[in-house]
Image: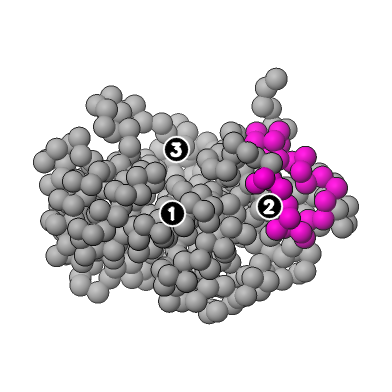
Amino acid sequence: MKIEKVRLRHVFGTIETDGLFWEERLVMPLDVYSEFRDTSKRVKWGDQVEESHMNHDAYFVQIETDEGVIGIGGPMDKAIAFIVENELAHYLIGRDPLAIEFLWDIMHRGSVHGRQGNTMIAISAIDNALWDLKGRYLNVPVYSIIGGPTRTEVPAYASMLGYNVLDMGLVNERAKQKQDEGYTAQKWFFRYGPMSGAEGLKKNVDMVRTLRESLGDDDDIMLDCWQSMDVNYVIKLAEQIEDFHPRWLEECAMPDRIDSYRKIREATNIPLSGAEHHYTRWGMKEFIDAEALDILQPDIYWAGGLSEVLKIAALATAFDLITIPHGHSTNAGIHFSVAQSPIHTPYQEYLIKWNTVHQHFLKDPVNPVNGMINTPTGVGMTMDLDTGKIEKEEEPNFGS
């Protein structure tokens, strides 16, 4: 079996909404500048033209073979699709699609200036498409060819990106709602960083207090700083929220500032998680060597694909660290999770609003039931697209 074509599919559709979809943004690194702290100047995550719906488009990579077996990866944005088509696809044509390790290695070695960032994200999409193809070829779920299943279901934590975090009444209401839906853990996102001063810090602390009062003592609360804070601010924040017993503080600083993570970890009893915006086993090893994190969060669609995240997780277990991949892809994530020991991967992230967008075009989206994600039964990574959701499909146009 040989790869005949690496096809990029650009699909368009409409997501139905009930009012404003993205209610509030999270704190971001650019907030150190006042012009970017203004919400109206933020880049939008979706084109919501009316309260009832928003337009949506996405790119998928479809790898096609001479035996008719395909594999699909995505969704991705235009910049990543461009790299797939113009810089990586040529490495695949005429190759054996089941030789995933070989294909990953030649893409990586051929990308001498792309070992991180968008090129690694593009490699990740191809890698995941190859795993989907291999599962289809063998007529089994992907987890069954990487050592799973280790269990029949995985606890999901409700990740509340895009929800209002300024109105404590709404925070209380939404937190209780997710608890009633069966989630025993929730992650919420801070809105304010160091440049918002004492008032912003107070509002961050108020959110954590509200969550603990809403959820009681037993549920886990995770808190995301989204790489937008610094050592002094996080230590001060941690001191004021430690009594609320967060499960972890996430991405306290930009991922290159590994020594900042080490200093924060030494100064607080709250576990630290991070590295979703870092790449490959070599990037994760930097955090491990520095003893800077308690939980590694590589993204399966960013850090190098399933192939690489399996290596990262194996490395992490040697140091008794937890690996819970960032939740960019629930489909890929569940295959990873159910092939890991529950003690090393105790949760899977489920981004509530993001999954509405990310899985919109998928025929078989993966959704938690009573706070648990069931082990999949479909072949591959169940990445077939739903033709009923695709209103238009165009050949990608990357310009001249």
Which of label 2 and label 1 is nearer to you?
1
* Label 1: how many Cα within 10 Å (few below 14, some 14–19, many 20+): some
Looking at the image, do the residues carrying marks 2 and 1 touch, with CB atoms under 8 Å apart? no
- Which disc number belongs to residue 351? none
- The quarter of the picture where the N terminus appears is bottom right
* Label 3: how many Cα within 10 Å (few below 14, some 14–19, many 20+): few
Q: Secondary structure at mark 2?
A: helix
Which residue lies at the image location 77% right of the left edge and 60% below the top edge? 98
Looking at the image, do the residues carrying marks 3 and 1 touch, with CB atoms under 8 Å apart? no
Residue type of the residue flagged with mark 3: Trp
Please say whether residue 184 is one of the residues in the magenta stretch.
no
Which of label 3 and label 1 is nearer to you?
1
The answer to whether residue 393 shows anywhere in this view is: no
Which residue lies at the image location 32% right of the left edge and 32% below the top edge? 30
Q: Which residue position holds label 2?
A: 104
Task: Give residue 290's quadrant in the image.
Answer: bottom left
Decide which of tag 2 and tag 1 comes sooner along the chain.
2
Decide which of tag 3 and tag 1 comes sooner along the chain.
3
Q: Which residue position holds label 3?
A: 45
Residue 221: where, in percent of width, then height?
Answer: 28, 63
Residue type of the residue flagged with mark 1: Glu
* Magenta region: 80-109
Query: Measured along the vertical axis of the image, is residue 17 above or below residue 291?
Result: above
Q: Which residue position holds label 1?
A: 286
Residue type of the residue flagged with mark 2: Trp
Residue 88: where, in percent of width, then height?
Answer: 70, 40
Position of residue 175 in the picture relative to residue 108 (left or right): left
* Label 2: how many Cα within 10 Å (few below 14, some 14–19, many 20+): many
Query: Measured along the vertical axis of the image, is residue 106 above or below residue 248?
Result: above
